[in-house]
């Protein structure tokens, strides 16, 4: 059958060139959906597409090979799409996941993001360019994460090799490099320091404090928000959108708390801003401390990596 609204815009990836293909797994119990996705994505020269009818078949494929992107329907026979995303991300943490849903609701968006999805796709697919664009965006997000990890490992390995090789570097440069290498290794194991600012939710504040995190309640207009490591906003907080938009150009990571009565428009705005989205006041509320700890660890790693890279450059220069 013909695929509606197709164009040749944005065909293949320039970097792919047919050499290093990205892998996409599509899971849907409707044959027509699998067929449309397979035919659409197979036209991308740098994509290899696998198909599964249900979660059980998908999990078998995930055990057998690595995938870059998982696209799954929310409603599957047996294990549902939300559970499949959670299990797939446990098996392959770097996996990007997209949820297919027949209707957009606050509940479905919260469930998908709580499970680890980074976006969702509405069906029926009215414009297949949207599907293609979302898959490309997911691949770009994964590529950036992988590049960051590879760079960090390369810097740490080079620092270790230079220290082991010795040379005639001044003792000050050597001590500095050793110190930052140890700090980076420590951050790789556990680094969750930093203040968390909570706006609009006493329950969230209490949950974070009970979990041992350094959290403080701040008003929406507090200048101290900019200095926090992570800012937690509730969708019910006054002017949360303006706060989140303002913080996009600042240093904090922003987590949006979506309560059980969250407005769908708010959640779609959160997706537009690329906020971390966590369901709260529901069965998934325990994921808030976990998500905040992940963000704090990521920030700690980034700081330690930057400091190590500077120390490494100083050490190399001192050898010359």
Image: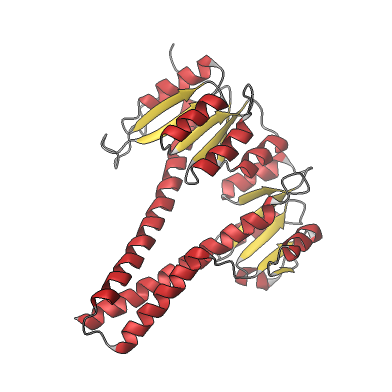
Residue 52 or residue 260, whichever sits in front: 52
Q: Residue 78's quadrant in the figure?
A: top right
Q: Is any part of residue 6 visible from this angle?
A: no
**Taking 280 as reference, is 52 left or right?**
left
Q: Position of residue 101 (x, y in %)?
A: 62, 28
Identify the residue at image location x=48%, y=64%: 188
Q: Position of residue 17 (x, y in %)?
A: 26, 37
Residue 43 or residue 160, whichever sits in front: 160
**Taking 146 as reference, is 271 left or right?**
right
Residue 52 or residue 197, whichever sits in front: 52
Name the residue at the left extreme: 320
Identify the image quadrant of the N terminus: top left
In the image, residue 198 above or below residue 81 = below
Identify the residue at image location x=46%, y=34%: 63
Q: Position of residue 191 (x, y in %)?
A: 55, 67
**Taking 208 as reference, is 85 left or right?**
left
Q: How many marks?
A: 0
Residue 200 or residue 4, whichever sits in front: 200
Q: Is any part of residue 119 visible from this angle?
A: yes
> What's the colour scheme?
secondary structure
Identify the residue at image location x=61%, y=60%: 293
Identify the residue at image location x=63%, y=48%: 270
Q: Position of residue 45 (x, y in %)?
A: 31, 30
């Amino acid at each position: 059958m013909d695929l509606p609204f197709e164009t040749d815009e944005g065909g293949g990836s320039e970097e792919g060139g047919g050499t290093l293909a990205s892998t996409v797994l599509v899971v849907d119990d409707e044959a027509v959906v699998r067929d449309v996705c397979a035919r659409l994505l197979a036209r991308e020269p740098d994509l290899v597409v696998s198909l599964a009818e249900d979660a059980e078949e998908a999990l078998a494929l995930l055990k057998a090979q690595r995938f870059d992107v998982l696209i799954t329907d929310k409603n599957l026979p047996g294990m549902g799409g939300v559970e499949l995303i959670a299990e797939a991300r446990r098996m392959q943490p770097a996996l990007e996941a997209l949820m297919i849903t027949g209707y957009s609701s606050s509940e479905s968006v919260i469930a998908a993001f709580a499970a680890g999805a980074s976006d969702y796709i509405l069906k029926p697919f009215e414009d297949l360019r949207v599907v293609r664009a979302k898959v490309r965006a997911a691949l770009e997000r994964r590529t950036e994460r992988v590049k960051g990890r590879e760079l960090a490992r390369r810097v740490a390995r080079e620092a270790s090799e230079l220290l082991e090789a010795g040379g005639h570097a001044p003792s000050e440069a050597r001590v500095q490099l050793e110190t930052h290498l140890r700090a980076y290794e420590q951050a790789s194991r556990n680094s969750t320091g930093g203040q968390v600012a909570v706006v609009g939710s006493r329950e969230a504040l209490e949950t974070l404090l009970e979990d041992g995190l350094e959290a403080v309640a701040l008003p929406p207009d507090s200048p101290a928000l900019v200095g926090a490591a992570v800012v937690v906003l509730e969708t019910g907080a006054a002017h949360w959108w303006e706060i989140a938009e303002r913080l996009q150009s600042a240093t904090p990571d922003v987590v949006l708390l979506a309560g059980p009565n969250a407005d769908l428009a708010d959640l779609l705005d959160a997706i537009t801003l690329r906020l971390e989205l966590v369901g709260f006041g529901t069965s998934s509320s325990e994921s808030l401390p976990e998500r905040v700890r992940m963000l704090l660890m990521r920030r700690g790693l980034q700081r330690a990596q930057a400091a190590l890279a500077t120390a490494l450059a100083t050490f190399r220069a001192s050898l010359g």
